[in-house]
Image (spheres, rainbow, N blue to C red):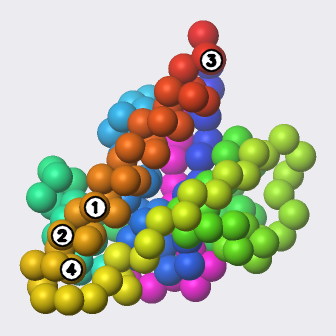
Amino acid sequence: MPPIRVLFICVHNSGRSQIAEAFLRKFGQDRFEVQSAGTAPTAISPLVLNVMREDGFDLANNVASNVLAQLRGNPPFHYVISTCGPETLSRLPQLPYGTISLSWAFPDPELVTGSPEEQRSAARAIRDDIRTQVIRFLHDVASPLG
């Protein structure tokens, strides 16, 4: 069976969508072809790089990509998942028939405030919430494929 194609999106592709992509790649194994992109891509957040490294992921070589290029330059995705809420989905062109769009609203790690340790703690919580949602997605959506 061909892999299920998933595109995670957020505004900058600098945090939340990168985290979701990393977790689905790990937990979904070869059942998924996964990408991430942003509507206005920028460099990956150093805070995200650090908290993902703590969890065994090296995102240092990841490059943020543009969602429009991903949608144009690839076969249709089965799922397009916003990690920053429904407003990002509304900025996309009409998705191909059969594409399922989902909205997961997580706080932006780039906007957390406080001391460096408070920022890391907040980013860890966001990372862990995204991990939980990816596992839920695998359970609810991918498991019945057999």
Dot 1 or dot 3: first in sequence order is: 1
Distance from disc 2 to disc 3, alpha carbons, whole Å, reads 36 Å
Is residue 99 shown left or right of residue 10? Answer: right
Res 84 quadrant in image: bottom right
Residue 125 image label? 1
Res 90 quadrant in image: bottom right
Q: Is residue 141 above or below residue 89?
A: above
Instruction: Kindly check if marks 1 and 3 are in contact, taking CB atoms under 8 A apart as contact.
Output: no
Depth check: 36 or 61 in front?
A: 36
- Residue 56 in view of the camera: yes
Q: Which residue is mark 3?
A: 145
Residue 121 image label? 2
Q: Quadrant of the C terminus?
A: top right
Q: Is residue 85 above or below residue 102?
A: below
What is the span of residues highlighted in magenta in the rendered image? 32-43
Q: Amino acid at mark 3?
A: Leu
Instruction: Kindly check if marks 3 and 4 are in contact, taking CB atoms under 8 A apart as contact.
Output: no
Depth check: 26 or 107 in front?
A: 107
Depth check: 68 or 110 in front?
A: 110
Q: Which residue is mark 4?
A: 119
Residue 93 screen position, x and y as percent:
83, 70
Instruction: Kindly check if marks 2 and 4 are in contact, taking CB atoms under 8 A apart as contact.
Output: yes
Distance from disc 2 to disc 4, alpha carbons, whole Å, reads 5 Å
